[in-house]
Amino acid sequence: MATSADKYIVSRPLYSEDGFLEVHEKVHRRHKSTLDHVIQFFMSDSKRVKNAALSLLPFISWMKIYRIKEWLLGDIVSGISTGLVAILQGLAYSLLASLPAWYGLYAAFFPVIIYFFLGTSRHISVGAFPVLSLMVGSVVTRLVPDEGLIPPVNITGFEGLTIGEQRAIVSASLTFLVGIFQLAMGLLQVGFIAIYLSDTLVSGFTTAAAVHILVSQLKFVLGLQVPGFTGPFAIINILQRVFSQISSTNLHDLVTAIVVMVVVFIVKELNERFRSKLPVPIPIEVIMTIIACGVSYAFNFKENHNVDVVGKIPNTFEAPVAPNLQIFQETAMDAFPIAIVGFAVAFAVAKVYAVKHDYVIDGNQELIAFGASNIFGGAFKSLAASTALSRSAVQESTGGKTQIAGALSAIIVLAVTLAIGFLLEPLPKSVLGAVVIVNLKGMLMQVCEVPYLWRKDRPDCFVWILTCVASIFLGLDLGLAVGLGVELIVVVFRTQFPRCSVLANFTGTDIYRDRKDYINLYEPEGVKIFRMPSPIFFANIDFFRGKLIDAVGFNPLRILRKRNKALRKIRKLIKNGELPFTTKTSNDTSYFHTEDSEDDGNMEDLDQPVDFSDLPIQVNWRSELPANITVPPVDIHSLVLDFSAVSFIDISAMKGLKTALKEFIRVDVAVYIVACDPYIIEKLKSCRFFDDEIRTSIFFLTLHDAMLHILEVNPPLSVCEKVYNKHGNLLNGNSSLRSRDIHNQRPETRF
Amino acid sequence: MATSADKYIVSRPLYSEDGFLEVHEKVHRRHKSTLDHVIQFFMSDSKRVKNAALSLLPFISWMKIYRIKEWLLGDIVSGISTGLVAILQGLAYSLLASLPAWYGLYAAFFPVIIYFFLGTSRHISVGAFPVLSLMVGSVVTRLVPDEGLIPPVNITGFEGLTIGEQRAIVSASLTFLVGIFQLAMGLLQVGFIAIYLSDTLVSGFTTAAAVHILVSQLKFVLGLQVPGFTGPFAIINILQRVFSQISSTNLHDLVTAIVVMVVVFIVKELNERFRSKLPVPIPIEVIMTIIACGVSYAFNFKENHNVDVVGKIPNTFEAPVAPNLQIFQETAMDAFPIAIVGFAVAFAVAKVYAVKHDYVIDGNQELIAFGASNIFGGAFKSLAASTALSRSAVQESTGGKTQIAGALSAIIVLAVTLAIGFLLEPLPKSVLGAVVIVNLKGMLMQVCEVPYLWRKDRPDCFVWILTCVASIFLGLDLGLAVGLGVELIVVVFRTQFPRCSVLANFTGTDIYRDRKDYINLYEPEGVKIFRMPSPIFFANIDFFRGKLIDAVGFNPLRILRKRNKALRKIRKLIKNGELPFTTKTSNDTSYFHTEDSEDDGNMEDLDQPVDFSDLPIQVNWRSELPANITVPPVDIHSLVLDFSAVSFIDISAMKGLKTALKEFIRVDVAVYIVACDPYIIEKLKSCRFFDDEIRTSIFFLTLHDAMLHILEVNPPLSVCEKVYNKHGNLLNGNSSLRSRDIHNQRPETRF
């Protein structure tokens, strides 16, 4: 019967969902209710407590497997290298935060100690992160503006302190609050929120941050005095100020900075190019810093050339401070995005190394670790800590295996700060600015993703650009919020406007495809197959109904109303004796409904199913109606909805779908829903979707099952004849149709 | 061959997507680019201009078909009834906006005139809307607080004006700005945004608004002096103030209000119950207002009992004012939600009547109409206009057919305001408050939806509650924003965490279902079928990979690394001569890769495909490995991903999917993707998803096609034997298996 080429042979009963359920019993699976989950949570308590205790101190687990012989050397080398980098970055990033330089060094010490015990990542280097420093800086300069500007709030306890000291207290309290938020999120187990910061969003956001960093470093590189601006459009104000003072550029600063930038840039490129040949990359930033210190000291840049230098670094730590509650109030709205960004960046970097070295990190534990680190750091006036990609790369690439490297780097920082910190005093700030700017290359180069995204994924490109532009002009916190909003809307958009299509059959097979895509498809007369390849919910149920009406070519509600109006007229004609029917069963009360004098008198009645009960005749809407009454014809008898890609239906959509289906059923179009997810059918049942008009028997397992059923129900002979005729014509007219398709035909498998 | 019960018989070639494309040529459909759309937009210019001009003035089209004989009487009756209601509501709702009473009357006149010409709805009654009035009121009291409180900003031009006059100017400017926003949105064709205000959101929001309205009317009903509070938690402050003064309640106000409330409530219930019997509902509010006016005048409530009355209503209109730009600046953030809410509510009401009376309304034209109405109204100090459901119901139910009824109602308002407005002077404000409160019943009763939603659709219930709570406590504007955010997140959530499942086959058919749902399913050995019924995008690609790894039971990356490590050891063994293989083709250079001394020296290499090229032997990972090297076994040879419900894949997900597929392919698991939307395949192709490892041949038309192909590729005999054995055992152990299933079997259709 089948040709030898036919390998796909199926012969089985025809199944509607109801019929299938009768034959194949479903296992009753009890789905856990919320209560069950709560009970389970408390039942498994003792084991959970033990696990929780262990997972709260992850260092225990890796300390147990520590291989001293193999790992320790790597950790030591890595710790020393990372420590040197951390010192330089700490100094530079505290400039971003508008703080005296040594507070950045604290961020490379205090938080690292806590993270050692609590963190699950073995490779990230905890400490200052430029984007975070900048966000802290914008809060700091808002609450404690430069001299000459009036602070927006008077904070108690600030009397008699220098601007630097005031700012340090603001930064410390903010860091403390960031830690509280992170700890709270960790305890609430909401570490999953990091997934909403998609790659695209983070890329656009960090590019914008790089622009901000670049602009904020201009004043150091040019040796200008520019007050910090905050709020929306601050970047424009800063640029305006910089360019209005451009003539008073300090040439010593500029030349030093350019020399440092060029040398560092070239050596970094060489490092990159000969990466495989070099045992460790040349630490050019450290070298240039030392040279710059020497030169600045030798020529007394500060006194002779009015160059802004790092200045005195205290050789003791400052005593811990209690956070200022008034600052908490003022910065609550800023601390939240800082907490999110700090965690998200660290988690992203940690994930890369976790995959690479095949261990597990835990988002919630990371939140707890960073929360505790920042609370501890904040108490000691440290900057808010996260991780810098560049520093983590140093820690990992120089052989760091565990956080022992991190702890060592903290000790290096401690030693340098306390013992030889004074050597850094003559370092010009322009050198730090230059180092920061050179390191922006990677972040700024992310702009190159835009043309790629534009070609590949327009909506994603849209997210990138909007996030970046909003972050540049509105500031990083608002920009992040805008980016998140746009990103969520894009997801909704993608789900909302799918490509609906009308399907048709490949003759002789069970395959259905968009009828516009192929030429020799067979569309059985009187049947429309409509496919909506997306979830159906409040935002696209109207879209769905519109597309459905477009596809079938008529509005069923309008037809129903016209039919009901026609029926009223017929009733009136019969009553007036103008129609030659004998009213055999009629009595007076049955004409109660015909009292309406106007044809649009009662609109609600027109939406009811056509009711023949009080009429002596059955009206055939396809034939001519008497007395010039016309009703638009309905040229389909069956409508098949392919729900195979409908992944959920919400309650608004259910109502809309029900209305739509009823409208079709009331104009005598049989509706079938095929390939619907069994869970959606269950949900529809539990929501009382079904009634006298819409029955569960409309569901069929596959499109082909429904089509075979339709063929069975609708006079198969006449349809068959028509099919043969139509098909025959098609064949004669189109000789390119492959003969195999015809060979395969048997009456049952025609479409 | 097939039993007579088998009606589903298909015999066709087996198709992969590639094979299918070869046989069935696809029509090349050129999809319009953005440029094409722009060109088309300008090409069809002349026709578009004419249509646009006509659609800008919709009254022309319905004036043409106006049936004077049939419609005019209805319009006149409706106009008069609506006018009377509009006067009362205008007075009452201006109290909500904290304005002198007559400004609400203006809202029933000026905007209506413009809407007559520009609006597409024939049935809504344009004018004051309580929620909108309240939102305006919160801005008004913020900028012009009650006496004794200091306004936050000094607005130029406010010197020497009374508080009422100042508030009128604020309200007028705000209304003007609302109009500008609406007009701009209409011109930008963004009328579709109304769909994001889902039924659930609007229900929660209006319930919260009803609570606000109730609280704001308490002071009138009790006759207290309570200043207006604004901002988050204002409602708590107001309630606190009201209850702290509760002892100074004016009993005359309270008694009057209670009497009015009780009478109006009862009569309204009667109206509702005998709706079919009454020609028109009893206008009880109007009657009670007239009675209250009389009583108040007769007993001189104002002087004798210190009752707060409406007071003097000027018998001329005020001259138009130019909007105040300073107020624009201060209220820009408030005007936007007002514009959205005003439009959305009016559009929702209009849509109901448009469906009922079968005409088309146009969201963008409605935005333009309301924009123009509010700009015009704002110039004449009118309140922001939208529509009130109750008033529109009056206009429609009393026989209104077109906006001629609306225009007539405006004329009634005009006449009453100018001619007999002074009669309303003695009306106590408590009566207005009482009328407002009674009318809140419907809005407050929406609370009953919550238990229904809770049972039927948990996430929707969540949206309702959060929107309502946020709107009550944070204020309507912030509450709306929170509600919208929650709503979008819920959509993302629903798409994000689908119910993944492992499928298995109903023996003898092409049907596959969740293996956990049925007992007698057949899962071919070595094959896993994984179904992810949702789009795949940045927020669930990790979830997808996690679930996939759970489903197959092993982590392919870990296996790959272990295999590569094992290979390194084998290479070392061979090099050292510890393995008894003759290195027939080896030369020195081929051992270049084995120089790594540590087994975890170079992680990147471990992620590469297993490379046997430099080895004299092929390693069979399933057999024992020499020298106690162990690699975890992989017990599947094929992985089938059912993508039938994947409606889109974004670019992040593409990267993640590619990585995941590669990991499986590299451990020799053949991956197949079935039932994938052809458009997704096209997109993957254009994004260079395919390479040497991932080929387009992995796509198959249906799950069954892929399974048959797998059976063909993987030694069919041995698999067949196993199947027979396994199946035989299953049969013996489970006699309930239907015999028909077995009869249908042929080798090709086993699963």
Image: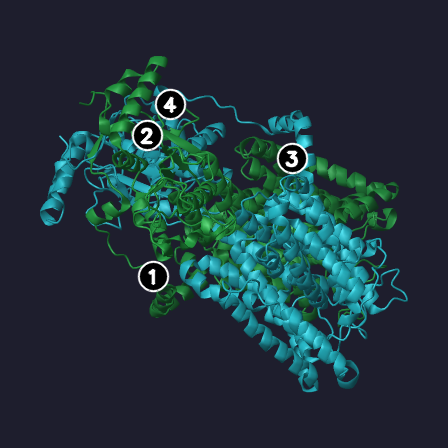
Chain colours: A cyan, B green
* Residue A210 image offset from top left, x and y in percent: 60, 67
Determine if residue B431 is in view: no
The location of residue A692, given as percent across then percent down, is 40, 26
Between the C-alphas of marks 3 and 1, the distance is 60 Å
Label 2: few (<14), some (14–19) or many (≥20) C-alpha neighbours in 10 Å: some
What's the distance in space between the residues labelled 2 and 4, CA to CA? 13 Å
Q: Quadrant of residue A700?
A: top left
Amino acid type, mark 2: Ile
Q: Which mark is residue B32?
A: 1
- Amino acid type at image mark 1: Lys
Instruction: Give the residue at mark 3.
Output: B267
Q: Which residue is mark 2?
A: B511
User: Residue at position x 39%, y 24% from top?
Assistant: A589
Query: x and y percent of residue A746 in the render?
Result: 15, 32
Marks 4 and 1, how far apart at CA: 45 Å
Q: Is residue B466 visible?
A: yes
Q: Chain of mark 2?
A: B
Residue most toward the right?
Answer: A160
Label at residue B65: none
Q: Nearer the viewer, mark 1 or mark 2?
A: 2
| Chain under numbered label 4 | A
Do the residues at discs 4 and 1 belong to one chain? no
Callout 4: few (<14), some (14-19), or many (20+) C-alpha neighbours within 10 Å? few
Query: What chain letter is assigned to the residue under label 3?
Result: B
Could you say which quadrant of the image residue B152 lies in?
bottom right
- Gap in Å between the C-alphas at discs 1 and 2? 38 Å
Q: Pointer 4: what residue?
A: A21
The disc, 3 or 1, on the residue closer to the chain's N-terminal end is 1
